[in-house]
Image: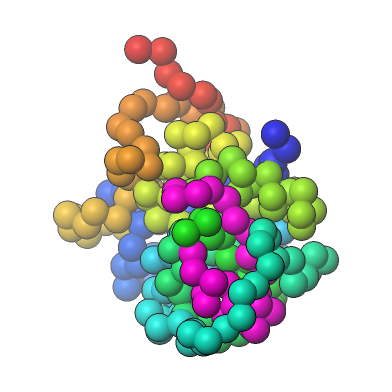
Amino acid sequence: MEKPYVIIHTLISLDGNINSINVPEFRSAAYQYEQIALHADTQVLNIQAYLNGRVTTDDNTTFYRKPDLNESAEAVSEGDFIAESNARMYYVSIDPSGRLGWQENFVDYGNIKSHVISVLTEEVSNTYKDLLRRLNISYIIAGKDKLDNALVLHKLDTLFGIKRVMIGGGGVLNWSYLQNDLVDEVSIILAPIADGSASPARLFSALKPLSNIEPRSFLLIEAKPLQDSSVWLRYKVVNSVSK
């Protein structure tokens, strides 16, 4: 099955926390993280689409608004809806149940207006799909009652011509794609800071039934010092580790 090259690109502290820590060293690392992958004029990963989970999107973009549904909407056509197939950049939002309160069809992500693609399951209501169509937001259906991650990537490739995807979600999303052997590279900006908190926000987190706890290994591609004592680590993903 065809799929794009998939990179998990993330920023973490020395103690493995992916949440923001409000100190100068972390802010410097965050800026360099954005320069590498998000800014239109500086990104070096050649990303064509950013894939994020629902919570990440709600936290940063839709802010837990309720979707503005039309309960008397006429039935929409079955299948996927492609509103734009040649955008400069895409923002792919995982939303299996159709809960995000979109108000426009783009995200200003890294100084680029990235066209939104909503990833749904067959269980999403007609009224929610009507909302997306009214806003001219593309959507793809990938699974009956739970998402098929491989199908998501296949449709991004074949329907939109997306060849390089960055996953910037939380630990559950990251691990589910990695455990499905769908990730090619893990890119980490390591900030020289720790706060000792017991935060559950980790780079990878298994969550049944989406994924399980099991070892994976990685092969170092590059380790590059950055400004203010941050480090950029790039790893090739190695498939399942023998037990």
- The part of the image, by quadrant, that contains residue 118 is bottom right
- Relative to 63, say whether 221 is above or below: above
Instruction: Provide residue 79's location: percent of width, then percent of height.
Output: 67, 59
Residue extending farthest to the top is 243
**Residue 144 in sight here:** yes
- Relative to 161, say whether 60 is above or below: below
* 189 part of magenta stretch: no
239 relative position to 154: left or right: left
Task: Identify which residue, 10 or 74, lies in the foreground.
Answer: 74
Instruction: Provide residue 231's location: percent of width, then percent of height.
Output: 48, 49
- Relative to 106, say whether 88 is above or below: above
Residue sitting at 54 percent across and 64 percent down? Answer: 93
Task: Identify which residue, 224 or 96, lies in the foreground.
Answer: 96
* 134 part of magenta stretch: yes
- Relative to 201, say whether 70 is above or below: below
- The magenta segment is 124-146
Instruction: Provide residue 67's location: percent of width, then percent of height.
Output: 46, 82
177 relative position to 82: left or right: left
Residue extending farthest to the right is 86
Task: Identify which residue, 115 or 100, lies in the foreground.
Answer: 100
Residue sitting at 54 percent across and 44 percent down? Answer: 149
**Residue 50 in sight here:** no
Residue sitting at 31 percent across and 67 percent down? Answer: 21
Instruction: Provide residue 166's location: percent of width, then percent of height.
Output: 60, 53
Residue sitting at 77 percent across and 48 percent down? Answer: 158
Quarter of the image with the N terminus in it: top right
Quarter of the image with the C terminus in it: top left
64 relative position to 72: left or right: left
